[in-house]
Amino acid sequence: MICLSLGGESMAAALQGMAACPPTAALIELRLDLIADLDLTELLRAKTRPVIVTNRRREEGGRFAGTEEQRIDLLCQAAGSGADYLDLEAATDDKLAERLFSAAAAGKGGKRPRIIVSWHDWRGTPGVDALRRRWRACREKGGDIVKMVTLARRPEDNLRILSLIPYSRRRGREIIAFAMGEQGRSSRIVSLLLGAYLAYATAARGRETAPGQFICEEMSTALNLLAPPGWNMRRP
């Protein structure tokens, strides 16, 4: 699936982005750490697709300026306000993570949001053995989906991060895995063809929430050209 990643610099921009979500995007990621005058309840009330709520910490490329407790509190609020998915960094303190798991279990109206346990490496792409160790750490944290993202410095870096997709799926765990940066752009498309749960895209050039994102329509066009017969872009 293609996921439109929305930051915006204000609530107005985020709401406008949700309302204008391209039809090629099956989900929307709301980057709370990139929205200055956040009103989470209003934002989730206005959702037009299933949403992933992300509140990225600075250590992994985000801009949230508060404490870790405040960061997780916002995710807990999202769990009770209609979020469909929550992004939890694997490095989050265990007690704070448990707080989020408990909030997700309570959900809203009996619906439990799925938890994506994520890990990002902005320095580069480690070797396969190191990546698999990180994958196991993400899996052991709990949650429903593993997300592993690295920075590609050379084309061959894409092969290592993409190798996690069949590795994870053979072990019964859904995964999101790709490389950031110009050298990693192709991995975003290939990841879906290999069976990744979703890949992130932007609504327009200049609105990227991470380096290397395609515009939604660009990604959809590439997938339609490259996908084998019978392949389903909205598999999950």
Image (cartoon, rainbow, N blue to C red):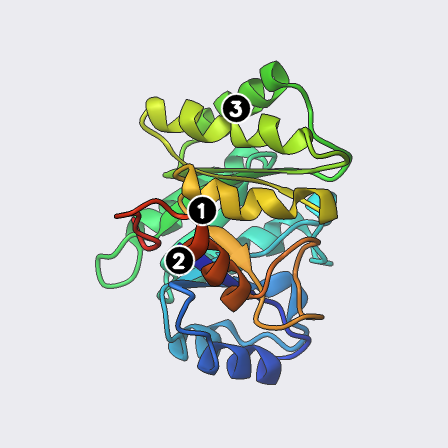
Element class at badge 2: helix
Q: Amino acid at mark 2?
A: Ala
Label 1 vs label 3, nearer the camera: 3
- Which residue occupies 36% across, 39% down? 144
Element class at badge 1: helix
Where in the figure is residue 28, as x and y percent of width and height? 46, 65
Where in the figure is residue 171, as x and y percent of width and height? 34, 22
Which label sits on residue 79?
2
Quarter of the view holding residue 175? top left
The quarter in which the N terminus is drawn is bottom left
- In this view, which residue lies farthest toward the left? 110
Which label sits on residue 100?
1
Q: Could you say which is closer to the camera, residue 97 or residue 165?
A: 165
Label 2 vs label 3, nearer the camera: 3
Question: Which is more N-terminal, label 2 or label 1?
Answer: 2
Question: Do tag 1 and tag 2 residues touch (Cβ < 8 Å)?
Answer: yes
- Which residue occupies 50% across, 42% down? 190
- Mark 1 → mark 3, Cα distance in angstroms: 18 Å
Q: Residues within 10 Å of mark 3 (few under 14, many from 20)?
A: some
Quarter of the view holding residue 208? bottom right
From the image, tell me which residue sits under label 3. 137
Tell me if 225 is positioned left or right of 188 in this view: left
Q: Amino acid at mark 1?
A: Leu
